[in-house]
């Protein structure tokens, strides 16, 4: 059952981020069976940042381990901002903002491959 999605530049990532400052395997979003959704950095060169919606452009924290995410949070990967817009029992929806607006819905429990 699919409960985690890898984000990065590599072609085999579940969500491919076309950003020269993103690492090939940059970070992972994990949906635990208890409903908690976290993001964790995968040893990326430039790190992963997480900001709540009201933190401003330079607010937020560097992700150092599995970090809970909530609706409205922004995950920064390189120069790309990814906003969490819905977390449900059966799916997680995110939208990439910046150069492109693309919405992905990732069904929890299914194997998905999503590339923009």
Image (cartoon, grey):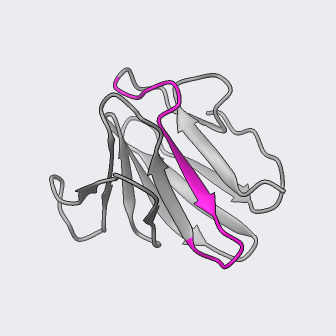
Q: Quadrant of residue 46?
A: top left
Q: How many numbered circles are shown?
A: 0
77 or 83: nearer the viewer: 77
Secondary structure mostly seen in magenta is loop
Q: Please report the residue visible at 33 percent of the width from the left and 28 percent of the height from the top.
A: 45
49 or 55: nearer the viewer: 49
Q: Please report the residue visible at 32 percent of the width from the left and 39 percent of the height from the top.
A: 47
Q: Which segment did they paint magenta? A: 21-36
Q: Position of residue 16 (x, y in %)?
A: 58, 32
Q: Please report the residue visible at 66 percent of the width from the left and 38 percent of the height from the top.
A: 14
Q: Position of residue 83 (x, y in %)?
A: 43, 57
Looking at the image, is 68 positioned above or below residue 41? below
Left or right, residue 90 beside residue 7 = right
Q: Which quarter of the figure is the N terminus placed in? A: bottom right
Q: Which quarter of the figure is the C terminus placed in? A: top right
Tell whether position 34 is magenta.
yes
Q: Please report the residue visible at 23 percent of the width from the left and 60 percent of the height from the top.
A: 60
Tell whether position 97 is magenta.
no
Q: Position of residue 7 (x, y in %)?
A: 55, 39
């Amino acid at each position: 059952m699919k409960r985690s999605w890898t984000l990065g530049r590599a072609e085999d990532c579940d969500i491919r981020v076309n950003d020269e400052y993103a690492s090939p395997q940059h970070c992972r979003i994990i949906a635990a069976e208890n409903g908690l959704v976290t993001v964790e950095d995968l040893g990326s060169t430039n790190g992963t940042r997480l900001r709540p919606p009201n933190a401003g452009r330079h607010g937020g924290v560097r992700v150092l381990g599995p970090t809970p995410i909530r609706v409205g949070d922004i995950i920064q990967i390189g120069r790309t901002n990814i906003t969490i817009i819905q977390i449900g029992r059966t799916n997680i929806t995110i939208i990439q903002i910046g150069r492109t607006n693309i919405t992905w819905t990732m069904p929890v429990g299914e194997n998905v491959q999503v590339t923009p």
